[in-house]
Image (cartoon, coloured by chain):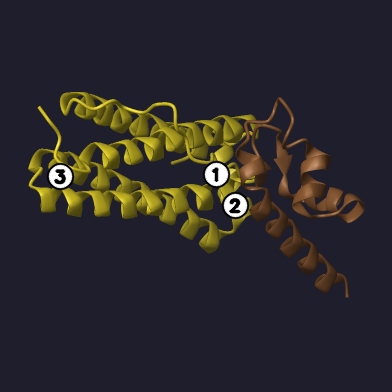
């Protein structure tokens, strides 16, 4: 099926964001485990896998629309030097993803591509859940302090 | 935060090196080899922003010390 104007370009832009997020969450997960904080490492890894599923949906949908998925392009992978910094970097990345998704949903609505719009609406819901989780982690740090928070992460508490 | 992932350069390390070898885009490129064959090229594209980050951090440290 042929894509409506501007849809494949937007899907490829979102794919770039997802591919970057997969790598960013993945390195944060491995660094958190290496630092001895498997609790938050599990969260980062789970988010990385969720972004990978999104990337797979996007790739399949771009191919369905007779476009070519661009797996070659990545944005800057942001790596922090601490768990708090990683949480903040991921929060900023998720907020950017929501903005880009919202614009793409509006575009799909405008050109009458309701299937793509529906796929992107599912993704924006997931990204907002990630934002909620990351904000909660940062609020917990502010409430109980970084030392106590990290102590919980050593034992991998949820 | 790492200012360059392919070279593994932390912002704190870039700030330390800038105290001795300068913080301009050229200084940072020379110090950390952002333009050599091992670099991905992204840091070279971002070197202006990295230089600004380093200078902000340096100003902060000077203000604290002063």
Chain bearing tag 1 is: A
Q: Colour of chain B?
A: brown
Q: Colour of chain A?
A: yellow
**In the rendered view, does A92 fall on the left or right side of B40?**
left
Separation of marks 2 and 3 at Cα, in angstroms: 42 Å
Mark 2 or mark 3: name the one nearer the start of the chain. 3
Q: Is residue A26 above or below residue B27?
A: above
Q: Is residue A124 above or below residue A53?
A: below
**Mark 2 in CB contact with mark 3 (< 8 angstroms):** no
Neighbourhood count class around disc 2 (C-alpha, 10 Å): few under 14, some 14–19, many 20 upward: few
Neighbourhood count class around disc 1 (C-alpha, 10 Å): few under 14, some 14–19, many 20 upward: some
Q: Where is residue A6 drawn, in percent x and y?
A: 22, 43
Residue to which mark 1 is pinned: A152
Residue to which mark 2 is pinned: A148
Quarter occupied by the C terminus of chain B: bottom right
Separation of marks 1 and 2 at Cα, in angstroms: 6 Å
Residue to which mark 3 is pinned: A117
State how many labels appear: 3
Name the mark nearer the viewer: 2 or 3: 3
Q: Where is residue A78 drawn, in percent x and y?
A: 56, 43
- Along the line of sight, the residue nearer the viewer: A156 or B8: B8
SS for callout 3: helix
| Residue depicted at x 29% and y 33% | A54
């Amino acid at each position: 099926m042929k894509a409506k104007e501007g849809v494949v370009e937007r899907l490829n832009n979102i794919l770039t964001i997802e591919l970057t997020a997969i790598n960013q969450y993945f390195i944060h997960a491995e660094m958190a485990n290496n630092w001895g904080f498997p609790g938050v490492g599990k969260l980062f890894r789970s988010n990385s896998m969720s972004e990978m599923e999104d990337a797979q949906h996007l790739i399949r949908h771009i191919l369905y629309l007779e476009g070519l998925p661009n797996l070659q392009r990545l944005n800057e992978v942001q790596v922090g030097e601490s768990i708090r910094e990683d949480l903040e970097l991921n929060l900023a990345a998720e907020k950017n993803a929501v903005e880009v998704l919202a614009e793409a949903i509006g575009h799909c609505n405008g050109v009458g591509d309701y299937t793509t719009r529906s796929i992107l609406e599912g993704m924006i819901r997931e990204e907002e859940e990630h934002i909620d989780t990351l904000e909660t982690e940062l609020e917990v740090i502010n409430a109980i302090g970084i030392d106590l928070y990290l102590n919980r992460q050593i034992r991998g508490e949820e | 935060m790492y200012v360059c992932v392919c070279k593994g350069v932390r912002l704190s390390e870039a700030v330390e090196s800038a105290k001795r070898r300068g913080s301009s885009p050229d200084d940072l490129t020379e110090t950390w080899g952002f333009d050599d064959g091992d670099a991905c090229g992204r840091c070279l594209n971002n070197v202006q922003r990295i230089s600004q980050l380093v200078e902000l951090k340096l100003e902060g440290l000077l203000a604290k010390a002063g």
